[in-house]
Amino acid sequence: MNKKFYLLLIVLLVGMAALAACQSSAPAANPTAPPAAQATEPPAAQPTEAPATQPEAEKVTLAIEHFSIIEGTTWSGAHDRAGKRIAAKYPNVDYVFREEVGPDLAVPYAEEMISNGANIVVGNAEFMGLPLEDIADKYPDTYFVSIIASDLSTKPNFIRMFPRQYQALYLEGLIAGALTKTGNIGVVSAFPSVQVIRRQAGFYLGVQDAAKLLNKDVTVYVKYAGDWYLPQEERDIASTLVDQYNVDILTQQTDSGSPLDVAQEKGIWFIGKDMDIVGEYGWSSTDTVAVSFDTRWEVAYDQIVQEYMAGNKNPETIMYPGMDASMTLADGTEEATVDIMNDGKVGIDAISPKARPDIPDEIIKLVEQRRDQMMKGEWDPFTEHAFVSNGTGLDLEGAPVPAKGTTVKPAGEEPTAEWLLSKFNFDLDGLNVLE
């Protein structure tokens, strides 16, 4: 090799050494960081903790045993609607039912539904709801519910209930008393019982107050069919009341649509019960139905369902809610336990537009005033008025019907819920009960 080659090689070696020296002496990016911070690979990603989830609400099944068919009835129809509204409000609540349940089937159906998950079992009439008490101890984690007719038997998980329908019936009575032109009002009724007598009393007091305010003579006739659902018998009674007693207002304490049919055929006013029959079922129209009252059983069911979901082993066992109790539906609508309704409207707006011109303003104002007072819990017709016996009614064990003219309760005295539910066994003085 020549000298030029050796010289070039030496220069290269010296340059490489110098470059290596510069790289080894370069400062670190973060001289104060610990060695781990200088790693050339990024640290492994730390697992993210999943957000906490709310525990799923306990599944609740509300099972209603209906004593009658549902379709075409106002009583069982209202209970069925209540079950559906409760299920719509609570995503964890299901509603199931059985129809045409008699006392002999109440327990077998209840046990079948319990085996399929039912937590709350209801008998929607007393005569077929009472047998549920016999199995209440067998299923301590199940709520059993029965409507009250007059018996007040309870257990910690056997609940009894009834709404204060008489409050809305009083408002209906005010309207009926104002509307009648013949001065005769007819009631197609089921049979004498505490429940029936109490409801008729509410209506009758309203009629009396309207008659007094308007200085009218009004007679209310009641005739019994013998049971709740006897379409032909109800039709015959309604026709008799119109043709023989000249009534121009008909109402009922029975469950078929026959009295309404007669009212429509005869061209007289009808006062509905239990449901808004025009708005809910499309029965007849406001040309025949002056007003109805609507029962929202779901207000009581709502309380029962909430008590069950809260795990309450000692829920309220005698429930008697009135117009001052309410609930909010799934769609945000707030509704009272009972109210006057017609064609989807409530309050004084529920009065038929055709009937409205025949009702004096003082009655309209009184209906509005009393409804508002009852919704606030400030007034009640059964507290306001005296209870004077008509001498007719239903003898109970240890409580015969008081003699005619007997003042059983003075005006201004509030009767107890227990008395109203189980002991009110006489018609009010002046009611005309037909044989």
Image (cartoon, rainbow, N blue to C red):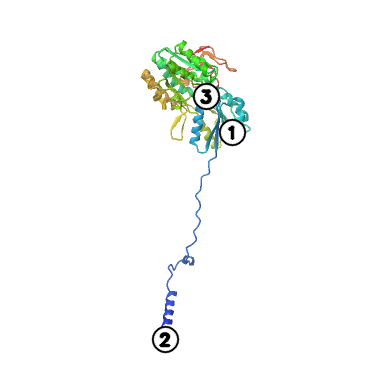
Image coordinates for residue 434, horizontal then vertical, percent? 51, 12
Mark 3: secondary structure? helix
Which amino acid type is marked by label 2?
Answer: Phe
Marks 3/1 in contact by CB < 8 Å: the verdict is no
Question: Image height check: is 214 above or below 312?
Answer: above
- Residue to which mark 3 is pinned: 417
* Percent coordinates x, y for residue 315 in the rendering: 55, 32
Q: Earlier in the sequence, mark 3 or mark 1?
A: 1
* Residue 51 pos. (x, y %): 49, 49
In front: label 3 or label 1: 1
Q: Is residue 166 above or below residue 6?
A: above
> Where the N terminus falls, by quadrant?
bottom left
Q: Residues within 10 Å of mark 1 (few under 14, many from 20)?
A: many
Q: Is residue 308 left or right of residue 279?
A: right
Going by the numbered disc 1, the residue's amino acid type is Met
Q: Is residue 430 something one can see in this rendering?
A: no
Q: Give me the residue at 37% from left, 17% from top.
A: 358
Q: Nearer the viewer, mark 2 or mark 3?
A: 2
- Furthest-top residue in view? 244
